[in-house]
Image (cartoon, rainbow, N blue to C red):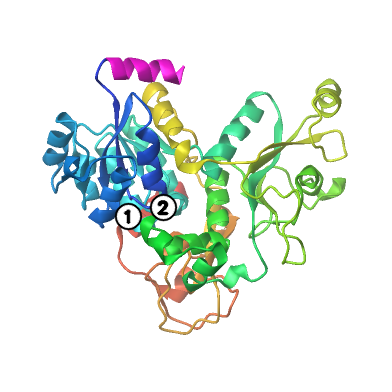
């Protein structure tokens, strides 16, 4: 289906024209994938570091002299008409280019992501939001903005929230109940307090690789300290209408064959107090030192439930799904997610069918709150996800609202007014927030949601 639609666009000389904001690992990966797809073109890349943007094209074989360095939106349109890729330091110039159809926001910075996505929707561009940090902060408002503009705001296929949401939608469409949905993790005992300085050793990155692949150590540290998994499951929760069962989720150490049993209700021998939750399956053993032999690691999963005996018999005895031992709960899982490689699927779904892969519901069900990594002192400045001061933890949106807990996406640059103990959740009342665009959007979202 998609191949036929793309072939028609290619044959008519009217490819889907994609602009990418942020040329780190993900953004460069999208450019590389689109370079192999007739009917879609990465026509422009915006990044504050133009050398990174140029490298995104160079890795796909684009000669340096074919790349246009531009500053204004009209110059981007001129480059597109001439068949030349454009790079710019100005994301708004990319957004304002008339010939860009879809904007992929891949910076990972809440302030930038909120600004770029909001203005792209106002300019009637579809937005593929890779930036879960921005999505969990103001995604509900961005979704409503997209609806009002008749455009699509979507999370991305290939990243865990989007990939898991597709499984959730499949299961619900077939009449299954969702017990739990989530992703695999690799979280060691010493990771929650990790800092960017520890990333190269943990991941085995050489300095040459860090520079060549434009690796953001702070971003990678958000994976290591657990914040990224918490962010991603919050994005999934808000799209699917799920909640965390407890603050931070249970994140049990489980092999694949144990997931459907452990992530069942406690009345059935599991750890959950309710169905319809987001969860994590840790592939690190309970000793905190070794990997489990059959851990899920890079994959995603959904525990589904049926009370129909004929369907249950098929799932268990005919199709041999992993089950919870109660003839009702069964595991769907996928051992991979291909991140930037699958991202074009979301672009095509938006352009061809006007539908998101996953988009926040109008009212959030979950929030990522800010937790002190260490004892923090009055006057210290917080540095956001993956940094030196705080980590992010998933909590129910209603709890976060009632306790005035500080969203992780608003934390960068916030100045503490009091001392905060290690492990303590930080509140709005304990910080002085810098003026920012994402804060303004969040205040508008809160005023209209609650």
First to last magenta residue range? 1-11
Classify residue 375 by image quadrant. Answer: bottom right
The residue wearing badge 2 is: 134
What is the magenta segment's predominant secondary structure?
helix
The residue wearing badge 1 is: 112
Residue in the picture at 37% in, 57% down:
212
Classify residue 61 by image quadrant. Answer: top left
Q: Earlier in the sequence, mark 1 or mark 2?
A: 1
From the top left corner, tell me how far across and down residue 445 is, in percent: 40, 50
Q: Do the residues labelled 1 and 2 touch (CB within 8 Å)?
A: yes
Residue in the picture at 23% in, 54% down:
50
**How busy is the neighbourhood of tag 1: few (under 14 within 10 Å), some, or many (20 plus)?**
many
In the rendered view, tell whether residue 419 sits above or below residue 106: below
The answer to whether residue 276 is magenta is no
Left or right for 9, reference 157: left
Left or right for 379, reference 204: left
């Amino acid at each position: 289906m998609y191949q036929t639609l793309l072939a028609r666009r290619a044959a008519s000389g009217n490819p889907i024209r994609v602009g990418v904001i942020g040329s780190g690992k993900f953004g460069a990966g999208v450019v590389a994938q689109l370079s192999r797809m007739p009917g879609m073109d990465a026509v422009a890349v915006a990044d504050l570091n133009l050398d990174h943007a140029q490298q995104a094209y160079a890795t796909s074989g684009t000669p340096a002299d074919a790349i246009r360095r531009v500053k204004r939106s009209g110059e981007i349109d001129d480059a597109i008409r001439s068949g030349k890729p454009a790079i710019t330091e100005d994301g708004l110039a990319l957004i304002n280019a008339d010939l860009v159809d879809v904007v992929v926001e891949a910076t990972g910075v809440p302030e930038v992501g909120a600004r770029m996505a909001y203005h792209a929707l106002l300019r009637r561009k579809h937005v593929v939001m890779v930036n879960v940090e921005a999505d969990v902060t103001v995604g509900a408002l961005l979704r409503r903005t997209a609806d009002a503009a008749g455009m699509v705001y979507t999370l991305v296929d290939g990243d865990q929230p989007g990939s898991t949401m597709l499984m959730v939608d499949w299961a619900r469409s077939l009449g299954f109940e969702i017990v739990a949905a989530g992703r695999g993790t690799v979280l060691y005992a010493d990771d929650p307090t990790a800092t960017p300085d520890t990333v190269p050793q943990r991941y085995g990155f050489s300095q040459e690789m860090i520079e060549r692949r434009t690796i953001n150590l702070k971003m990678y540290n958000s994976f290591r300290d657990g914040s990224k998994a918490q962010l991603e499951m919050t994005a999934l929760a808000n799209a699917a209408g799920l909640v965390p069962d407890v603050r931070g989720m249970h994140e049990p150490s489980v092999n694949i064959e144990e997931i459907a049993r452990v992530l069942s209700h406690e009345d059935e021998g599991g750890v959950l107090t309710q169905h319809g939750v987001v969860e994590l399956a840790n592939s690190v053993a309970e000793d905190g030192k070794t990997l489990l032999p059959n851990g899920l690691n890079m994959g995603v999963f959904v525990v589904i439930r049926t009370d129909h005996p004929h369907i249950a018999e098929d799932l268990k005895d005919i199709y041999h799904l992993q089950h919870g031992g109660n003839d009702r709960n069964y595991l769907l899982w996928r051992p991979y997610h291909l991140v930037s490689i699958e991202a074009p699927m979301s672009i095509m779904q938006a352009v061809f069918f006007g539908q998101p892969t996953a988009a926040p519901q109008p009212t959030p069900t979950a929030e990522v709150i800010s937790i002190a990594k260490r004892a923090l002192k009055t006057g210290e400045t917080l540095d956001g996800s993956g940094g030196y001061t705080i980590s992010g933890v998933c909590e129910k949106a209603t709890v976060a609202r009632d306790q005035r807990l500080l969203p992780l996406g608003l934390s960068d640059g916030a100045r503490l007014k009091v001392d905060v103990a290690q492990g303590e959740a930080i509140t709005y009342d304990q910080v002085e927030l810098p003026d920012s665009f994402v804060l303004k959007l969040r205040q508008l979202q809160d005023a209209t949601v609650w």
